[in-house]
Amino acid sequence: MRFLYPLGLLGLIGVPILILIYIIKNKYTEQTVASNYIWHYSERFLKRRKKLPKIAGLISLIMQLLAVVVISLSIAHPVITFPGAANEYCFIIDASGSMNMQSDGGSRLDAAKAEVATLIEESLQGGVYTLITVDDNSTDVLCLRESDKKKALEKLSGVVASFGDTEMADALSMAQSYFDANSGVRTYLVTDKRYEQHRNVELITVGGGEQNFALSDAKYTFDAENETLQVEVTLSAYGKDGEVSVSLFLGEEESPVDSKTLTLAADTAETVLFSVQTPGFGSFRLQLAGNDALAADNVLVVYNRISENDQTALIVSATPFFLQSALGAVGNVEVTTVTPDAYAKAGGGMAGSVPVTGYSLYIFDSYTPAALPADGSVWLLNAQGNLAEAGFSVQGEVALQEAVPLTLTTSSASMAKRLVENLRGEAVHVYKYMKYGLYSNFTTLYSYRGQPLVFAGQNTLGNNQVVFAFSLHDSNFTMLADFIPLMDNLISYSFPGVLDRVNYVSGEALEINVPAGCTEIKIETPGGDVAYPTSGLAAREYLLREPGAYTVSLTVGGTLRRYRVFCEMQEAESAVMATGATFSLQGDAGEGGLDGIYDDLIWLMVLLAVIFMVDWMVYCYDKYQLR
Amino acid sequence: MARIVIDEAFLQQIESLQTLLKNNVGGSPGGNRKSRSYGSSAEFADHREYVDGDDTTKINWRIFARSEKLYLKQFLDERQMHTRIYLDVSRSMEHGKGKKAEQALRVAAALAYLSVAEMDKVSVYIIRGNRTEAVISGIVGKEAFFQNVHRFNEIAFGGDCRISEAILPEKVGYGDGMSVIISDFLTDEDFAEAIEHLAAKKRHVLCLQVLSAEELNPQIRGKVHFFDSENMEDTYRKNIDREIAKAYKEALAAVTGRVRDLATATGGDYQLIPAEASIGEVLFGRLVDTGVLK
């Protein structure tokens, strides 16, 4: 036995002090009385008593000594050690999506945590505990060889299941390393999957036998001409046979546009088809009716990505016909047109009656604004004046005797290739152009005698910028077939997609292409959590763990842009009874026990002391009426 | 030294009381008491048949004329009583604040006064060890009492007291009054022989047991080591708890009962006198209640 705080034993000094005080204080009171006769005579009337009275006078002392000893030992905290009686424990807890399934009033993870907690609590003090949680994204060591049961249990209580798959490779590797270091380590794998081979590992299986339906793999086609939306989704049944209804909702509508009821055998899947008439849609939702073991795989939302990425453009031009036509041909661009005068009256970039901010693309045709807008891409056509942010200087107008052909770039640079993709290489002629001196890095698309006449790149504000050194009216470009593909390429370049995809699977990373001028990114999860990834980099990743609809909000140039994405569960996690691969540790298990510690001794002592004192007090009160 | 606190006014107050003698006792001629024996006073008492040798002058001839039988007239004999008061002056009577001793002296003085007020003869003895000493011997009348009452103040308490050994050898009189023993009677049967001896001498025995409050109702608890005031080698060492206290009560009842039983069994009287009680309460309460005084 040892003491955690040996200084507490100093309190035992009180024992001899008490005894001394007792000896000094406990003298018989001497007194002369008239006669001892009656006192002696009273002996005849005393009932025969046991020897107990002889120590009755010591009761007070005994209780005081007991109190001093117990208090001293309480402070000193005695600990008894049993060599080799405790163990090292390694718990590998499956935290994959399927552990969210409800089973017997709680989730499978709850049951797993309860099993581990029981093992920890019932283990002999002195053991050490390693807790590892596993899903497909990470293998986390929550505590490593933790000797404090309470801390280990606290860590355990904080475990939450992800919605991803189970990737045991890292956990197995870790467990093997612990086993190699101490062959006496007791390794427990707590999971809902069935492992047939688990040598040197004790398998604790939770769940099984529940009923679960799952939606997955939603696809759609939309025929704009016939205004027909066709949706296809896979409906799976796990665990038990059953009947289930699946409904299709458009957008945020509360009422379904179509529903189908199917009866499925256990562990089978069917494809469900919907065909509905609609002129368009931003999103649709597929939803199962009723409750099953796992709610997370009962809803699927599919967003129309193009619709979600609608962009707005402002054309500042006195003759906007060609530009409006080109943007209209590309589609999905909401165009606003103002004259240069109106734009100038509005401040040319300052707030006014005409909205001059909040556009994804600003096109200045034969007009030079006071300053470039900061919240969107810019096209400058036939700019006459210098702009500090534009990255080039105006050197003057060049008028030609006759129209001259421009040279299409043949650069193999990826940006150049991307911007001239699908162009036939038709000859573009101009008879008047502006000569610009470039001092920023631009990619030239068309040139005349080395003079860049159509070029693209980022201006000093960080926004994509396309420059035409001539007016479309001074060229034949709009008459050429290459005009529309070029416009398409330039629009794609000017409207960089913030999100590459809008539908994900749990465990995937949401990649955000951060536009220039973005000051804040806000991501709201289905569970209501809000994250603010740093917006300083061009692209940001956010790991999607929770199934459901996410809202991504970007603040660009003071304007809020919102995007919606949906994350569905991993299909494999919907299975009620999954089988895992082998989880075995190589080597032979040994003893390797640690020193067991029993430190609850003090409570036992206190309990005994209390029982002892209560017993004596009751006895003494009854028999002696002690004062 | 004890002080007598009975003043003259108190003595006048109790003058109206008389000692009540319950026995048919003899005594010297004179006095203010009627003997139950037949004597030569003028007060007729009874008749009895004549036997040879009787005084023929006391034959009632009227009865002889009616019944032809000889009967003698008998007359009550008035004799002077002799009250003998024995006072225990051992150390146990004086221990503490001396209240037992004071009470004993007050009671003795009061009884002596009442006796002389009845024209009886009074003797007061102290018992010291195994001897009696006369403090007041055979006085009659108040004048004599007041001349001798100061002697009560001179009584010194100390030593032990063996009542029987002291009384038995002494002259105690025969059938001529009351013998009063004032003591705490805290002894083993030492007094029994004396009481029986006095009763055999046709004395009316009055036992007055004087006990202090700490003897009647001891409050002490816990560890005590008592030393007997009369014999310091006699010790009592105990942890006094509820059970011992209860046993003490029973022992006290036994001790007082034993004295009372002995006194009443021999035709006498007994009274317990708390040392702290006032003399008024003792005389007008306790002694009147028991019939000793009226």
Image (cartoon, coloured by chain):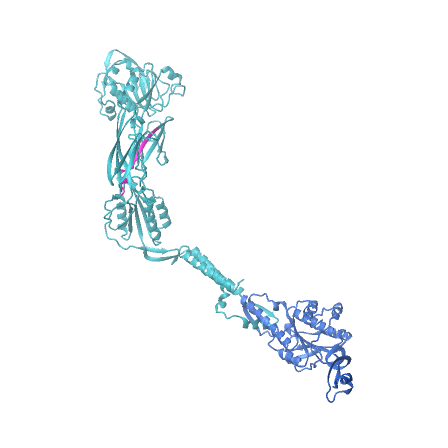
> Relative to A508, is B127 on the left or the right?
right
In the picture, one chain is cyan; tell me its letter. Answer: A
Q: Position of residue A387 (x, y in %)?
A: 35, 19
Q: Is residue A468 magenta?
A: no
Q: Position of residue A246 (x, y in %)?
A: 29, 34
Front residue of this view, candidates B161 and B277: B277
Q: Is residue B282 visible in the rendered structure shown here?
A: yes
Numbered range of the magenta stretch:
A562-576
Q: Residue at x 60, y 77 (%)?
A: B189
> Relative to B291, is A256 on the left or the right?
left
Q: Is residue A571 magenta?
A: yes
Instruction: State whether residue B13 is above or below residue A371.
Output: below
Q: Residue furthest bottom?
A: B52
Q: Position of residue A305 (x, y in %)?
A: 29, 28
Q: Position of residue B149 (x, y in %)?
A: 74, 73
Q: Which quadrant, please, contains the N terminus of chain A?
A: bottom left
Q: Residue at x 48, y 69 (%)?
A: A51
Q: Is residue A509 visible in the rendered structure shown here?
A: no
In the picture, one chain is blue; tell me its letter. Answer: B
Front residue of this view, candidates A256 and A569: A256
Q: Which quadrant, please, contains the C terminus of chain A?
A: bottom right
